[in-house]
Image (cartoon, grey):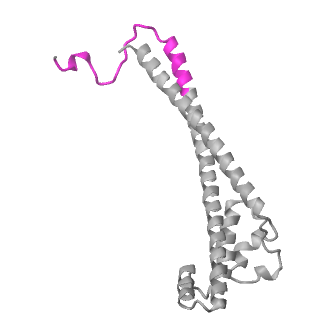
Amino acid sequence: MRRKTFDTLISTAGLVMAAVLLAASGLLLWAHTFVSDNVRTQLAAEKIFFPKAGSDGLNDPAIKPYLSKYAGQQLVNGDQAKAYADHFIAVHLKGISGGKTYSELSAEAQAAPTDTVLAGKVATVFKGETLRGLLLNAYAFGTMAKVAFIGFWIALGSGLGFLVLGALGVVHARRTAYDVALHVPGWHPEHQPAH
C-alpha cells in the first residue's frame, strides 16, 4: 500500500470520527439543557421552599445537617429535591407512621375500617410518599442532565482532537509523494505467504 493512500484513509476515518463526536456533543448539550430546564420549570411551579434558617423546621437533628445549606431557598433542582425528599418529607412521614410503610399502614386500615385516625394517617403517608417519589424522580433526571453535560465535554474534546489529527493527516497526505511505499518495521514483501 502506498503511504499517501494509507494517510488519506486514516485521515478520512479521523474526520468521520470527528464529525460523529461533534454531532454527539451537540446532542448531549441539547439533552443537558432540555432536561435541566424541564426539571427547573417543573420544580419551580410547585413553589416548595426550604424552612428558613433558625426556624423550628430545621431544628430536628435528622433534618438540620442536610437542609441548612438550602435554608429559605426555593426548591428548583435535583440535588435540592433529593435533600427535601430524603431529609424532610421522609423524616416527617416516619414520625406520622411510626416508622411503618404506606403498605403496612394500609393493611392495618383495611383490617380496621372504622378507625378514622388510622385512615387519616394512611392518606397523609400516601400523599407524602407520592410527593417524595416525584421529587426523587426529579433528582434522577437532574443527575442524567449532569451526566449528559459531562458527556458533552468528553465528546467535544474528543471530536476536536480527531478533527485536528484528521486535518494534520490530510496535510501530511498532500505532502507525501504518490510513489512512496508504506514502511512497516519488521515486514518485508518476501515474508508474504505464497498464494
Above or below, 117 against 130 in this view is below
Above or below, 149 against 178 in this view is below
Which residue is at the front of the view, 139 or 188? 139
**Left or right relative to 125: residue 177:** left
**Left or right relative to 143: residue 183:** left
Which residue is at the front of the view, 188 or 18? 18
Q: Residue furthest left?
A: 194
Residue shown at 61% from the left, 39% from the top: 27
Residue 59: percent from left, percent from top: 76, 83
Q: Residue furthest front?
A: 114
Splitting the image into 4 quarters, where does residue 168 fall? top right
Which residue is at the front of the view, 80 or 135? 135
Residue 109: percent from left, percent from top: 57, 87
In magenta stretch: residue 185: yes
In magenta stretch: residue 140: no
Residue shown at 57% from the left, 80% from the top: 102
Which quadrant, please, contains the N terminus? top left
Magenta-drawn segment: 165-194
Number of on-image labels: 0
Residue shown at 77% from the left, 79% from the top: 58
Residue shown at 58% from the left, 89% from the top: 113
Above or below, 29 against 100 in this view is above
Residue 186: percent from left, percent from top: 29, 24
Splitting the image into 4 quarters, where does residue 171 fall? top right
Which quadrant, please, contains the C terminus? top left
Residue 41: percent from left, percent from top: 74, 55
